[in-house]
Amino acid sequence: MTWLALRIARSALRHQATRHRYGEHPHQVADLHHPPGSGPYPVVVVLHGGYWQRPYTKLVMRPLCVDLVRRGYAAFNVEYRRLGRDGGGWPQTFDDVATAVDHLADPGLRDAGLDLGRVTLLGHSAGGQLALWAAGRAELPAGAPGAGPQVDASRVLAMSAVCDLQRAGDPARALLGGTPAEVPERWAQADPMRRIPLGVPVGLVHARGDETVSVERSREYAAAARAAGADVTLAEPPGGHRDLINPGSTAWEVAAEWLSARELGA
């Protein structure tokens, strides 16, 4: 562990966030981390990965949230229902992500200093798939899970993301409750490869040595998105799958630089 990662890890243990409940289920919660002062701060909605399953939780993203605060962002670290005993899957997991994002506009957060004109959706691994899905909510058909967003994202950062649900195998079929032939409308709405192009800038950061989700998935998404005229960038830093959620890593620094550049309008 580098000195910076150790410092941030220690800060994470001391750092206090405010807990917000966006539903009645125990896992319909999110932690808001924000810098001192009155803001307004750009907001990063943080979505953890884990192939939509237990035991993975938002806790793995806490050090990243602390580092985002250090960089001047408010970070909204979202928990959501996952497959299994949580009762997640279609449409519950998607409803949770959509409701959590829209909760940023709740009157109870009015004094939190959030700039809802500068909202980034950030997801890692399976959370990257959810972030890409949430970034396209405005184009979903009426009545679909997540349609009609109250909070619009201005960009999305998908890190080592599951960009192609069909290549994700059994976990993706469990998430959507069937195969593409059995529930085609769900796949059409949820699979990032079938939602190209998105109407917001997309940043893809995928470690070249990723042993869990191949970098080829992000390359394929980027190529298809560019062919469709989308605003998409792809960076391939060194490292493995979890390096992107290590705030002391080169991979995370590359992702944070994309955030900073886009914040400046570059």
Image (cartoon, helix red, strand yellow):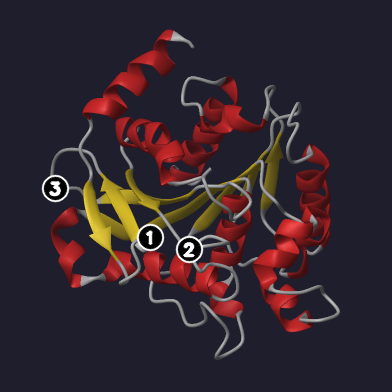
Gap between marks 3 and 2, in whole Å? 36 Å
Say which mark, if any, is on residue 199.
none
Say which mark, if any, is on residue 27.
1
Gap between marks 2 and 1, in whole Å? 8 Å
Of pointers 3 and 1, the one earlier in the residue sequence: 1
In the rendered image, which quarter is residue 124 located in?
A: top right
Disc 2 marks a residue whose amino acid type is Asp
Disc 1 marks a residue whose amino acid type is His
In the rendered image, which quarter is residue 34 located in?
A: top left
Judge the density around disc 2: few (<14), some (14-19), many (≥20) Cα neighbours within 10 Å.
Answer: some
Instruction: Give coordinates of residue 102: x percent, y percent.
Output: 37, 70
Q: Residue at x 54, y 49 (%)?
A: 123
| Viewer can see residue 44 | yes
Q: Up-down: is 213 above or below 26? A: above
Q: Up-down: is 217 above or below 66? A: below
Instruction: Give coordinates of residue 54: x percent, y percent.
Output: 54, 50
Instruction: Give coordinates of residue 147: x percent, y percent.
Output: 52, 81
Label 1: state its secondary structure: loop
Q: Residue at x 33, y 33 (%)?
A: 66
| Viewer can see residue 202 | no
Left/right of residue 71 with respect to residue 14 in the rendered view: right
Q: Which residue is mark 3?
A: 38
Q: Residue at x 18, y 55 (%)?
A: 112
Q: Are marks 3 and 1 in contact (CB under 8 Å)?
A: no
Label 2: state its secondary structure: loop
Label 3: state its secondary structure: loop
Left/right of residue 115 with respect to residue 101 in the rendered view: left
Q: Up-down: is 211 above or below 262? A: above
Q: Which residue is mark 2?
A: 86
Of pointers 2 and 1, the one earlier in the residue sequence: 1
Q: Residue at x 27, y 27 (%)?
A: 13
Disc 3 marks a residue whose amino acid type is Ser
